[in-house]
Structure formats: structure tokens, C-alpha cells
Amino acid sequence: MLRKFAGLSLLFCGATLVFGIIGSTLAHGKELPDFTDLVAKQGAAVVNISTTQIIQGVQGLPNIPENDPFYEFFHRFAPQIPHDQESKSLGSGFIISPDGYIMTNAHVVDHADKITVRLTDKREFSAKIVGVDSRTDVALLKIDAKGLPAVTVGDANKLKVGEWVVAIGSPFGFNNSVTAGIVSAKGRSLPQDNLVPFIQTDVAINPGSSGGPLFNMNEEVVGMNSQIYTRSGGSMGLSFAIPINVAMQVADQLRSSGKVTRGRIGVTIQELNRELAESFGLSSPNGALVSNVEKGGPADKAGIQTSDVILEFGGKQVNSSIDLPRMVAVVKPGTRVSVKLWRNGKVKQVTVEVAKMPDSSKLAHAAKEPAERSGEVIARMGIAVSELSADQLQQLKVSGGLLVEDVTGSSALDAGLQPGDVLLAIGNVQIRSLAQLSRLLKQFPKGHNVALLVRRGDNASYIAIRLDEK
């Protein structure tokens, strides 16, 4: 309930009475943001995108109106005739050049047989797909037009958490809807999207807003709205935008060649926590921990090893494991890049030649669950282990390791060890036998964290275990 009295607004909500001054100033004299100029200047460059997909051979009634004389016949005698069916969807986009190039999300135009772009002046154009990159969810379209209003591209790297941003799009088909909010966070990593450092905002984004622009207060596009986190299907104040720097890099490649080429170095990495960092002698958990090196790959040829911690790539600091794939992906294949490593308590410098990332990765593993055997208890770790048979070594494609048969110690349980896991290494030292493991553990005092390379199924990663007394 809202009532106004002499310039004051009274908001009654339960037992709470809130007083506020109506106007454009806040308590400390700062003006509320005014988005009118931004919308007036940039809104015309935002477009509505509608797509049609023809689904062939659908079983069921043909699309015949009820008042059609043949409706009853088909309804009674031919209920399952195969026919083509149209599937329609809506999205948003924005013009990036006056000659008709338009950017949107890849999922907006995915599998579309027909794409129609509608401008704010109600003109409609049939659009062609220049290229699509599903890994970043970016698509580039082209319409046959000139002299179009285009957005001003900004720099997402200059965004600050807490600053105002504005989204314009077509949620639920309501063209050129304007919503505003603030930048909630930067560099967010989402599942299956490790190549995009998403911008998180609390701007209201709903179905149909996908592909629309995110503006800063300088009237520049800083992102492309892509995803929301929701339990209801609508906005919950958690929306994610692709930084415009990433989107434009992809669009430039799509425009020149119709596809995107990325770099790779052939390593599997994981995040460092404080326990793992301590076990490797690092003062802070910064960097990307290498848990596997592809045999014969670029990293292997450069001398990078399992248990190395990559601290810098191409002179840029790797603060977290999610930073490295993004750094490598933007490097042109064939480029030689300097890599700074941490190995055995020392800094090491190597040079790796970046290779081309394949269009689709195919991983083939023949590992099977090893058969149960009578294990030897390693008291300091609280586990029972046994040596792998020749058949098991061949199935797992490893030259050594120990099978975990039972987990009883609190440290091992807390670390997440499970029966069936295979211990491959301590630090960068490969485990080949029970006797060797016992000798290795004697080197560490009570309470010391050791980094244990553990294989589970097809994946291997490091975990930290705190050792008990001898």
C-alpha cells in the first residue's frame, strides 16, 4: 500500500513504516541514475529476433482448424498421420555495424530454418547466419540493409562491481523492454562454460531477453545477456552476460572465416586449495594444478609434468584454474608462449607451442573397476591398499599405482577417498609399490599435508591428506 502526503511517501509493509523523499536524490545527495538518454540513443540498435524450425514427420493430427470440413474426418479416422510442424521461438540481438551485422546468442538461432529480424521502426528482414560458436554461445547474423543504427562497443574489463548497468531486449516478446540493475560480480564460471568469464548482474532478464545487450552508463555495450539462474522460470535477480570483449573476438573470427579457432596445450588442471598449496610448498593457493599431461601433446613436449603448478601464462598471472583455459583459448595455434611453473619448491620457466583445439573432444578410456584383493593397511593415511595386477595396470593404462580397498581414517574420509580409487602419485613421485609408499611417507612429519594424485573412473585429480602419527 502506497500513500503520498506533501512530497513524502509512506510504505506500509507488515508492521514496518518506511519514510522516503520522492525525487531523484538519495540520502547523501547523490542523484539516482537517469537512463532516458541511453535508451533514446541506443534503443534503436536493439532488435527482436524470431525463429522458425520445421520439425518433419511429427505423428499426430495435421494442423487443421476445428471449423474445417475435413477436421472431423482426420480426427476420427487418421489421428496419427505424419506431418510437418513449426516450432517458433523469440530472442533479442543488437546491431554492431551499420551494414547489417547483428550479434545474438547461439542458442537463440540454434536449428532455425528461418530467422526474422525486426527493428524498432517495424521493418522486418530475413537474416542469414554468418557463423555460430556454441562454446561461448555467440552467433553472428547478417541482414541486407545499410545505414542502420549500431551500438557503441565498450570494454567489459573496465566494469566495476556495484556499478549500474541497463539491459534492453524482448522478454516474452515485449519488444525493447528496458531493465536496470548493478554488476553483482565479474569473472563467474558456470558449468560447461569455462571459456567465458561471465558478468553477473541483478538486472531482470527473462525468456526472450537472450542475446540482448547490456549497457554501462557511458552508453556502451559491455555484455550480451545469455543465461539466468532460476527456480521458477523467471527472473530471480541472478543473470549472466557474456563480456563484450569475448563476444567481439568470437564475432570477428566468425565474420572472417565462419568459424572460431582456439588454442590448447594438452593438460588437465584442477583448483588449488590451501591444503594442496601447503603440500607443494606454496605460500598461497594461486595457480592451476596440473593433474594430467596428454602424452605427446604441447605441454608434454615443453616438459610440463603432472603436479606442476602453472603460475603464469604468456606473462599473465594465473590466479585460479579457471583463468588458464581462457588464456590459452585466445592464443593463435602455432604461437610459442612462455609458461612459469612451480615444481619441487622452485620456479621453473618453459616454452610451449600452442596447438589447435579440436572441434569436438573425444576421450577414450578403458579403465574398469579393479577386483577386490586383500589389502595392506597404511595406518598414517587410514586406508587399506593393494598393488594392482598386470591385467589391472593394462586396463587402467598406467605403469603403477595402488588400489584403495577400505577407508577408515578421518583424514582420508574428510578428503573424500573411496574404495575403488587408485593412488597414482604423491606430489610428482609416481607410486609403484606398497614398499615405496611406506618409504615416501617416512619423509613427512605428523600433521603434514601430502598431495595425493587419485584416479576415480576416467578422471584423476589431486587431494590433500593430513598424515597421522607413525
Image: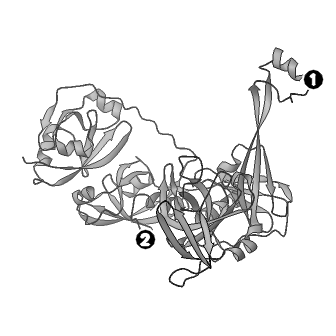
Toward the viewer: 4 or 341? 4
Q: Which residue is mark 2?
A: 315
Instruction: Kindly report the distance in space between the C-alpha atoms of the residues bearing marks 2 and 1.
Output: 74 Å
Instruction: Say above or below: 470 vs 405.
Output: below
**Image marks 2 and 1: residues in contact by CB distance under 8 Å:** no
> What residue lies at 75% left-to-right and 27% top-to-bottom?
58
Instruction: Say above or below: 343 vs 462.
Output: below
Q: Which residue is mark 1?
A: 69
Give coordinates of residue 303: x percent, y percent.
36, 57
Give coordinates of residue 331: x percent, y percent.
53, 62
Helix, strand, or loop for circle 2? loop
Residue ranking furthest to the right: 69
Q: What colour scheme was applied to this rendering of the protein?
A: one colour
Residue ranking furthest to the front: 5
Sequence order check, earlier mark of 2 and 1: 1
Give coordinates of residue 411: x percent, y percent.
19, 46
Q: Is residue 372 visible?
A: yes
Amino acid type at mark 1:
Pro
Residue 282: mark = none
Toward the viewer: 4 or 252? 4
Amino acid type at mark 2:
Gly
420 left or right, relative to 48: left
Determine which quarter of the picture holds residue 77.
top right
Label 1 environment density (alpha carbons within 10 Å; few <14, some 14–19, many ≥20): few
401 left or right, relative to 192: left
Give coordinates of residue 311: x percent, y percent.
36, 65
Helix, strand, or loop for circle 1? loop
Please give the count of numbered marks on the rendered protein: 2
Toward the viewer: 424 or 118? 118
Instruction: Say above or below: 235 vs 436.
Output: below
